[in-house]
Amino acid sequence: MESVTLFAGTANEPLAAAVARELGVPLAGRTVQRFPDGEIAVRLEQSVRGREVFILQPTSPAVSDHLVELLVFADACRRASAARITAIVPYLGYARADRRQGRRAPVTASLVAMLMETAGVTHVVTLDLHSPQLEGFFRIPIDNLTAVPVLCAALRPRVAEDAVVVSPDLGATRLAAEYGQRLGLPAAVCHKQRTSGTAVRVARVVGDVRDRPCVIVDDMITTGGTIAEAMAALTAAGARPEFTVAATHAVLVEGARERLAAAGVRELFATDTVAQPAGGDPAMHVVSVAPSIADVIRRLVADESLHALPSLAYA
Ligand code: R5P
């Protein structure tokens, strides 16, 4: 792996360190400073001329700061004559802004894709994009992988045989089908309406949930509102009040975990695409995607297909 130069942004240094350990390479030297006015300054502490460079930086909260940091990293690598610049963005923020929400509104996800390309990124690797069609905003290659296989491996021993996989909204239906297929469980779906950035309402549940424990799955949890609403609707529809939740990206803004605990979530499974503080309620099982990301890097360096990657490819 001598040919790999892996930079860690500041958004998730533990994940970058774990990936570097898996690869058996040191993280590349860099300095990231934040000036008193909020500006970000990045300096590469080693040459990248002609190198295959990877920058690991989820654009998790603070989303805009981490995005700009990623862009600045890419710009530094491009100006220092890196051969290829792959942005590994395990969680891509602004992904929900994938269409105009009414008149005079932006499509910020499209803007983010353009900014990355302009900054010099030549390839993007991400996990469980909010919607797969986001790939269309990128003109550079993008590999959208999934954490469902590694999450299912963790869930399998803890899920009852009569459980049902539930998508908390129509958007996560494909994800729920993937979980259902891998866990050998049926799937149900909630019909959610978002009433504001922080409030949602579940109008109805489609599928047989009566007297069954539920495994609610989503690409991301931010405030916990979607999950809490789904649980209330599932309880009203007769589901057994035993709720397990699995999400690729536990963004979990302040108050979200308390909200999930208060709603009665028994166990929460998520990956480490977003750095997590230790402890807290509900019990959280964090599954690392570091070994899978290391595999991805090995394959990209060798120009091998990612499709054959068992741990991160869609079934
Ligand atoms: C939305 O469509 C997403 O898939 C998630 O359901 C949503 O972003 C979760 O946000 P929150 O936890 O704030 O309800």
Image (cartoon, helix red, strand yellow):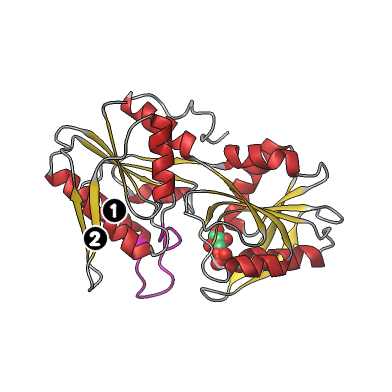
Residue 139 x, y percent position in the rendering = 29, 45
Viewer-side residue, 209 vs 294: 294
Up/down of 199 relative to 300, above or below:
below
Q: Residue at x 23, y 52 (%)?
A: 31
What span is colored magenta in the figure? 93-108
Where does the N terminus fall, quadrant-wise? top left
Which residue carries the number 1 mark?
70
What kind of secondary structure does the magenta stretch mostly adopt? loop
Ligand 1 resides in the quarter of the picture at bottom right
Up/down of 255 relative to 210, above or below:
below
Examine the image and state in which quarter residue 47 appears: top left
Residue 90 x, y percent position in the rendering = 43, 47
Amino acid type assigned to the residue bearing label 2 in the image:
Gln
Which residue carries the number 2 mark?
33
Residue density around tag 1, few if under 14, some if 14–19, many if 20 or more, within 10 Å: many
Q: Quick one: SS at disc 2?
A: strand
